Image (cartoon, rainbow, N blue to C red):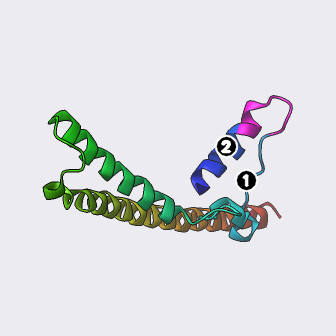
């Protein structure tokens, strides 16, 4: 969600011709921490949504499979498969959330490093100009 907010804020200001180009922060402390928030005010954390979505997707896959086979949806002998499919989907969602968190952390760390490097270069250029 954080990347989406960054993209829309940058694209929104670039798309409008009257607003100037957004100021690129030169120091990590200049970055608005709300851009990297993993939780929107008043909503559950993203992981819960992702687990619920992929768990329900797993259930949907099971219903689709049984429907293609033209078997009854709630046959007593095959009810055990629904929680298995839901758990499989939820575990995929959990793995996907971990991948997303690791990528977000790596990108945030890399951005902070690049901003720090840019600030050091600007400081060197300012000292050289004096």
Label 1 element class: loop
Sequence order check, earlier mark of 2 and 1: 2
On the image, the x and y values in percent for residue 57 come to 35, 49
Q: Nearer the viewer, residue 93 or 119?
A: 93
Magenta segment includes 39: no
The residue under label 2 is 8
**Magenta residues, start to end:** 12-20
Q: Residue 129's image quarter?
A: bottom right
Distance of mark 2 from mark 1, alpha carbons? 15 Å
- Residue 128 lies left or right of residue 38; in this view the side is right
Look at 16% across and 40% down and name the residue there. 71
Label 2 element class: helix
Mark 2 or 1: the one toward you: 2
Give the crowd class for mark 2: few <14, some 14-19, many >=20 residues within 10 Å. few
Q: Nearer the viewer, residue 96 or 88?
A: 88
On the image, the x and y values in percent for residue 22 come to 77, 46
- Residue 75 lies left or right of residue 14; in this view the side is left
- Residue 18 lies left or right of residue 12; in this view the side is right
């Amino acid at each position: 969600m954080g990347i989406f907010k960054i993209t829309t804020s940058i694209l929104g200001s670039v798309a409008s011709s009257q607003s100037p180009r957004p100021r690129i922060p030169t120091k990590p402390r200049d970055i608005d921490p709300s851009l990297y928030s993993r939780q929107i005010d008043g909503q559950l954390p993203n992981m819960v949504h992702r687990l619920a979505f992929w768990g329900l997707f797993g259930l949907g896959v099971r219903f689709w499979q049984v429907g293609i086979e033209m078997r009854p949806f709630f046959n007593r002998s095959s009810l055990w498969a629904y929680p298995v499919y839901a758990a499989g989907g939820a575990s995929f969602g959990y793995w996907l959330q971990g991948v997303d968190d690791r990528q977000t952390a790596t990108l945030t760390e890399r951005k902070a490093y690049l901003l720090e490097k840019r600030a050091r270069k600007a400081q060197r250029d300012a000292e050289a100009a004096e």
